[in-house]
Amino acid sequence: MNYSSDSRANPPFRPTLRGCVARNPQLARAFSGIYQHTLYEVAAMTYRSLIAETTDHGAARLFDEIAIDAAEHFRLLGDLILALGADPCIQVNLCVEHAPRQKSAFSNFVIQMISDAKQEKKRSVDRLQTIMGKSADRVVRSVLSHLLDDESRHLAALEAFS
């Protein structure tokens, strides 16, 4: 499948959040795991793009787009955590698939990377939906809705490769 990065739906979503949401450190802590996972996703999708580039340019471009969106999500979530009254600290413990040494195994590896990415996206959608159910704040829900739209779009694009 050909995938064009021109399909990015919107420019970066950067609302002003500080002063627009009620301080809620407990809700901010609920975003901690998603925030950590989003940093992982930036690194994992960038790595996957580098590896896929040798055999599947379409998959590489898709992984690039997801990495770029994940970087925007990471920033947006950090801003939201700050606005809610907590510190968006990170703990780095990244573990991504290791590329095979033999070129002949790369096409199967790309398929595995896409499968792994789909599972990660499904977990992200579930986490975001769970947190959305915990917040009545309309600004927080708007941010979550934006993130869910992107995650769903990414998941659909990954599933189109199957």
Image (tube, rainbow, N blue to C red):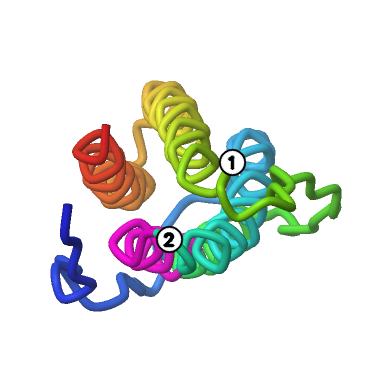
Residue 55 is tagged as 2
Residue 72's place in the image compared with 115, above or below, is below
Residue drawn at point x = 54 percent, y = 49 percent: 106
- Secondary structure category for the residue under label 2: loop
- Secondary structure category for the residue under label 1: helix
Residue 74's place in the image compared with 95, above or below, is below
Residue drawn at point x = 62 percent, y = 49 percent: 35
Judge whether residue 36 can be spotted in this image: yes
Report the amino acid beneath label 1: Ile
**Could you say where residue 89 lies in the image, as x and y percent from the top left?**
79, 58
Residue drawn at point x = 36 percent, y = 74 percent: 14
Residue 34 is tagged as 1
Badge 1, how many Cα within 10 Å: few under 14, some, many 20+? Answer: some
Numbered label tally: 2
**What segment carries the magenta color?**
56-70
Residue 2 is one of the magenta-drawn residues = no
Frontmost residue, 115 versus 77:
115
What whole-number distance in Å separates the C-alpha atoms at marks 1 and 2?
31 Å
Quadrant in which the C terminus appears: top left
Query: In which quadrant of the rendered view does residue 134 lie?
Result: top left
Report the amino acid beneath label 2: Thr
**Could you say where residue 121 lies in the image, as x and y percent from the top left?**
42, 35
Query: In which quadrant of the rendered view does residue 109 lie?
Result: top right
Residue 10's place in the image compared with 157, above or below, is below
